[in-house]
Image (tube, coloured by chain):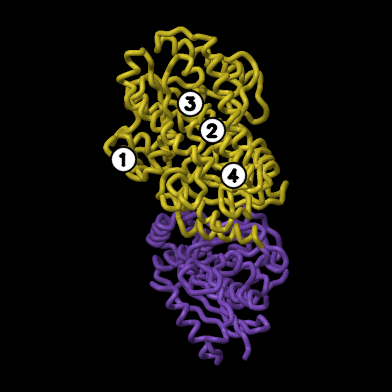
Chain colours: A yellow, B purple
Amino acid sequence: MAEEKKYRQFQVSKDLKRLMAKHYALGRYYRYWGRPLRRKLAWITSGAPVELLRAFKIYSVYPEQYGAICSTAKATEKLCQAAEAAGYSQDLCSYARSHIGSILRPDLAPMQGLPKPDLLVACNNICGTVLKWYEALAHLLKVPLLVLDTPYLPGEQTEHAQQYVLEQLQSMVAHLEALTGRKLDRQELKRQLTRSAEMTKLWREIRELAQAHPSPLNGPDLFIQMAPIVAIRGSQEGIDYYRKLKAETEERVRRSEGSILEEKIRLVWDNIAIWPKLFSFTKMFTERGACFVTDTYSGGWTAELAPGDPMESLAATYTEIFLNRSPEFRAQQMIQLIEAYGANGFVLHSNRSCKPYSLVQEVIRRRVMKKTGVPGLMVEADMADPRAYAEESVRTRVEAFLETLQA
Amino acid sequence: MEDFFIGVDIGSLTAKVVLVDAQGKALGWAVARSGYSGRDVAQRLTREILAEKGVKEEQIKATVATGYGRVTYPAEREVSEITCQAKGSAHFFPGARTVIDIGGQDSKVIKVLPGGKVIDFAMNDKCAAGTGRFLEVMAGALEVSLEEVGALALKAEEHKSISSFCTVFAESEVISHASAGALKPDILAGVCESVAARVSALVERVGLESEVVFTGGVAKNVGVTKALSEQIGYPLLIPENPQITAALGAALLAWGMGKN
């Protein structure tokens, strides 16, 4: 972690560590406090409608975020091998493999794995893999699985799609009522949505501060600071934390303090972070004065709540997320980011694990280059599995790309 | 005392050194296997060229290093092989708009502006398909020398196709063709087409514009050249010594530094 020191550290990051440690500790000791309070624990996908679960007082943890934790803790390789030995193909998502590995071999897993859940909730707005991953979990752990199927949107949202998702949410409510023994409190759901919206707005505003030159945020800042919006969205503590982060980021902008010491090149990042190489990868850019001022990944948690009553709003919001949209939509999103953040280039991480995120990137790259004239680089790697990273070939591409930007 | 400039390209299989004079004219070059220490090999080649041309070490005003081994070589600047390749190719062919380079461990397609400025590029995924190493493995399986591959492939009558991109699987395909009695030229034609197909896909990524220059050690292979030219539908311009273009580009960049 010596490389970490070359970045300008956020003072509030100490609070972030405490906040996330508390979240995972609460999960870990959930059996001591959750049972007496009749509260259930769920494992959920990153795109699941957590506000609904919170209204049922369900405590949610995210195996995907845990996959990233395993990777930064250098545990992924062994956990993946454990899953591969059990028959899970090496071509599967590395979050799924490492998470399944953590169940098979808790002795190899950070925090000895996640606390055992009472239920599983999977929403396929982010990918199709989660369906089979969560089916495997349901089978391994013998717990109920609730699935929310969000149809892919080739164009704009349709009445039909929204209705289809809404009906599933209604039946999910019935299941949750049976599983928790509680009735849905609609006022509570509304409160959860309001708090969620407030936290999302703060995260959006923090990110937009990076439109300043130099940018107060770099890729690793975005990837680290996104933890609360993913894992504790809608909590008062999360809102309080983002208020502090926003104030510190504003202070950086006021003082014209960049995240990196000398910003010469501004880049947009696409796809999940390369967690096992987060700092060494970014260093290749930082050394040459290149800063990742914004990204599509941590920006996935900035969408405003769709209008309508709480259930309608949930149905639309969770169907409209960018990974569930067309290549045209995503190319347009990249173009807007390049323009709004004054970027000189963009970098696409072709992520071996994440097919829906990566498959269309070449189409997006060409389209964006044609429309904006801004060059884009593709690097092949994996979000969690270090075995899919070839240091030298990545370095050659990165150096050549930065040379073309500087020439 | 006249000034001179050196470009060093330490690749995964071979090291190349080019010497240019104060007018930016290439005076001499040398190529050798990079082996265990590409840096030592490149330093030896440099000494040899300097001795041959009667140039003293203190006359070397700048050195630029490129290729995988660039970080190990004591040079004024390290530049990626993509920038160097584009520069060197444009020197030989000023009309070049697309440069296809197939080296030992990687293949790349570079889109360039007049003068050799890079505007886009694509490289092979971390896999040996479509590289010199792939050809070397297949030549080994058929017990022919790498230099013979191209000429033999041109003699093919019935082309055997190699469908696997994985070098190990492709080698077993080659062996199974051989044990089924297929002739070496027929199998080698399939091998050359497989390399060309992989690289054509990269060409498609950056978009093709003529003129198209083909460089790297594999450009010496007539079998791959023919297959590639047919697949992309354009003639390929090949420098007299296609292995040294990146080293020449590095030397020209060193020369450019010396002028300023």
Quarter of the rendering containing residue A242: top right
Label 2 vs label 3: CA separation? Answer: 11 Å
Looking at the image, do the residues carrying marks 4 and 2 touch, with CB atoms under 8 Å apart? no
Mark 1 vs mark 3: give the one in front: 3
Give the SS element for disc 3.
helix
Q: Secondary structure at mark 4?
A: loop
Q: The residue under label 3 is which amino acid type?
A: Glu
Side of A94 relative to B227 (left or right) = left
Q: CA distance from mark 1 to mark 2?
A: 41 Å
- Determine which residue is flagged by label 3: A237
Circle 1 sits on which residue? Answer: A82
Chain letter of mark 1 equals: A
Question: Which mark is drawn over residue A216?
Answer: 4
Mark 3 / mark 4, whichever is N-terminal: 4
Residue A388's place in the image compared with A243, above or below, is below
Asked if the residue under mark 2 is in contact with the one under mark 1, i.e. CB atoms within 8 Å, the reply is: no
* Labels 1 and 3: the sequence-earlier one: 1
Residue B68 location (% of width, % of height): 48, 66
Amino acid on which the number 1 mark rests in the picture: Ala
**Between disc 1 and disc 2, whose residue precedes?**
1
